[in-house]
Image: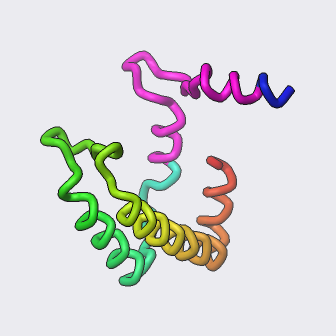
Amino acid sequence: MARFKKWHMRNSRLEFKKDSNGNAIIFQDIEDAMRGRTVDYGKEYNDLKEQANELLKPYRAQNGEINASELPDAVKNILNEIYSKQYEIRQQVISNNPALGELAKQYK
């Protein structure tokens, strides 16, 4: 069974139902649900986001995509720490806002 799961993960992809324009329906649903709501994660979160962007600048291609194969392990480790801190901040904000928490559960 474990071999099948590994095979399945390597040979499968997640696809979303699309509307007649080819846009994923779930993203439109989320956008509609978030309309009129803003989420402020705070200064620390924004500072972490800026740090991550600065670290990634030298590794971006001209089209804006990140050349992950060129990222040194040291940069990857720092990014993992930054993303972990951002995750903790997001979870804290969601837990402090019941309506936002319900929305997050709905689209998880």
Q: Give the camera-side residue of 67 and 12.
A: 67
Residue 82, relative to residue 62: is it above or below? below
- Residue at image position (46%, 38%) is 28
Residue 77 on image: x %, y %: 45, 65
Residue 36, relative to residue 43: is it above or below? above
- Residue at image position (62%, 57%) is 104
Q: Is residue 65 left or right of residue 74?
A: left
Q: Is residue 29 left or right of residue 54?
A: right
Residue 93 drawn in magenta = no
Residue 22 on image: x %, y %: 40, 20
Q: Quadrant of residue 48?
A: bottom left
Q: Residue furthest left?
A: 62
Residue 29 drawn in magenta = yes
Magenta stretch in the rendered image = 5-32
Q: Is residue 52 left or right of residue 80?
A: left
Residue 27, relative to residue 14: is it above or below? below
- Residue at image position (28%, 71%) is 50
Residue 3, relative to residue 46: is it above or below? above
Q: Which corner quadrant holds the N terminus?
A: top right
Q: Give the camera-side residue of 80 and 29.
A: 80
Q: Is residue 59 left or right of residue 95?
A: left
Residue 81 on image: x %, y %: 48, 71
Q: Quadrant of residue 4?
A: top right
Q: Give the camera-side residue of 4 and 48.
A: 4
Residue 34 on image: x %, y %: 48, 55
Q: Residue furthest front?
A: 73
